[in-house]
Image (spheres, grey):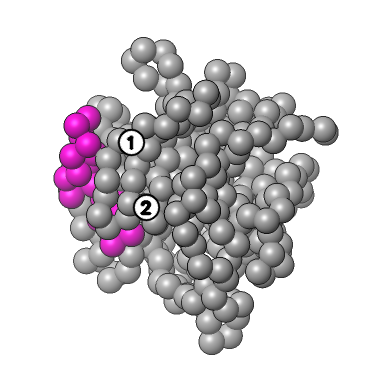
């Protein structure tokens, strides 16, 4: 398929956690974290950027509770409520559960937040023996603020989605090169762990389309080089791909008026120092719309 990939916004640092959301005025915007700049921002389809809040501990995963409250995960392991005035109020300390930082998040229709914790590795060196993150967890935060670990032995969990029927949780295990699925139990627990797809390259952010495929951001195909975005069926068949030279690809989501705009978040290649201005968000039209999860 011939596509035109266009620039939506540049001069970012490290865009992550993209979420398309339509406001009360009927206008849609992309919400995202500019992680290393410490900012939560929006951008519309005309490329107009607005600042929402500054999070000192660096924001990553974004979402909304059913009552409309915006929440953001910060890398120190805190879940924060973001006020309409830009205020940042810590509401849950997840670091106390395992001593790790936290990253991406997906929230179900009942307001339950599934958040991945992580242990660091040296991104300046090839991942492998002697340079692999230790196992971490998936943490469930209930609407009442209670938090517990619902999956262990996760290899750097990153982007996640919940199927439209609310029955399945799928998460990227970046340094295991795979997508992993669980069944969601009535109390929010995760069971029936299984490999959804082996990719042979590290997945990061993911988004689901209406055919049940996942668009997956792949930071690199070969360490130190570029990656892109692949569309994957359960079982691992790659049915589409968008290769991106000169940048690493970290996150994606579907949105736009028909949910057929794929937003592509990129920044510096793995193994290089990152600077303000290295990040950008591109857009491209695809054939199959998103489900909104996320």
Which of the marked residues, 1 or 2, is nearer the chain's N terminus?
A: 2
Query: What element does badge 1 sit on?
Result: strand
Question: 23 or 66: which is nearer to us?
Answer: 23
Which range of residues does the magenta coloring cover?
73-91
The residue carrying mark 1 is: 51
- Judged left or right of residue 105, residue 172 is right
Q: Categorize mark 2 by other alpha carbons within 10 Å: few (<14), some (14-19), many (20+).
A: some
Residue 236's x, y, as percent? 72, 53
Report whether residue 106 is seen: no
- Neighbour class for label 1 at 10 Å: few (<14), some, many (≥20)? few
Q: Position of residue 150 (x, y in %)?
A: 37, 58
Picture layout, residue 147 above or below residue 290: below
Whether 82 is among the magenta residues is: yes
In the image, is residue 79 part of the stretch drawn in magenta? yes
Q: Residue at x 63, y 55 (%)?
A: 247
Residue 66 in the image: above or below residue 247: above
């Amino acid at each position: 398929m011939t596509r035109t990939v266009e620039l939506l916004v540049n001069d970012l640092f490290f865009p992550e956690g993209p979420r398309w959301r339509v406001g009360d005025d009927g206008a849609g915007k992309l919400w995202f974290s500019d992680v290393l700049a410490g900012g939560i921002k929006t951008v519309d389809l005309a490329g107009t950027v607005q600042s929402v809040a500054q999070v000192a501990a660096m924001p990553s995963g974004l979402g909304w509770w059913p009552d409309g409250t915006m929440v953001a995960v910060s890398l120190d392991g805190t879940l924060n409520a973001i006020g309409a005035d830009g205020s940042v109020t810590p509401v849950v300390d997840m670091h106390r559960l395992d001593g790790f930082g936290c990253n991406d998040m997906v929230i179900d229709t009942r307001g339950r937040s599934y958040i991945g914790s992580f242990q660091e590795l040296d991104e300046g060196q090839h991942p492998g023996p002697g340079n692999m993150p230790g196992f971490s967890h998936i943490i469930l935060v209930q609407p009442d603020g209670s938090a517990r670990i619902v999956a262990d032995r996760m290899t750097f969990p990153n982007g996640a989605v919940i199927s439209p029927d609310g029955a399945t949780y799928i998460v990227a295990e970046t340094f295991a090169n795979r997508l992993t699925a669980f069944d969601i139990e009535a109390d929010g627990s995760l069971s029936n762990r299984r490999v959804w797809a082996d990719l042979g390259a590290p997945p990061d952010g993911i988004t689901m389309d209406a055919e049940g495929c996942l668009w997956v951001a792949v930071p690199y195909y070969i360490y130190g080089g570029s990656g892109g975005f692949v569309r994957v069926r359960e079982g691992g068949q790659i049915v589409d791909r968008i290769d991106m030279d000169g940048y690493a690809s970290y996150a994606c989501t579907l949105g736009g008026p028909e949910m057929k705009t794929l937003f592509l978040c990129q920044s510096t290649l793995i193994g290089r120092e990152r600077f303000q201005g290295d990040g950008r968000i591109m857009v491209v039209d695809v054939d199959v719309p998103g489900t909104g999860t996320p």
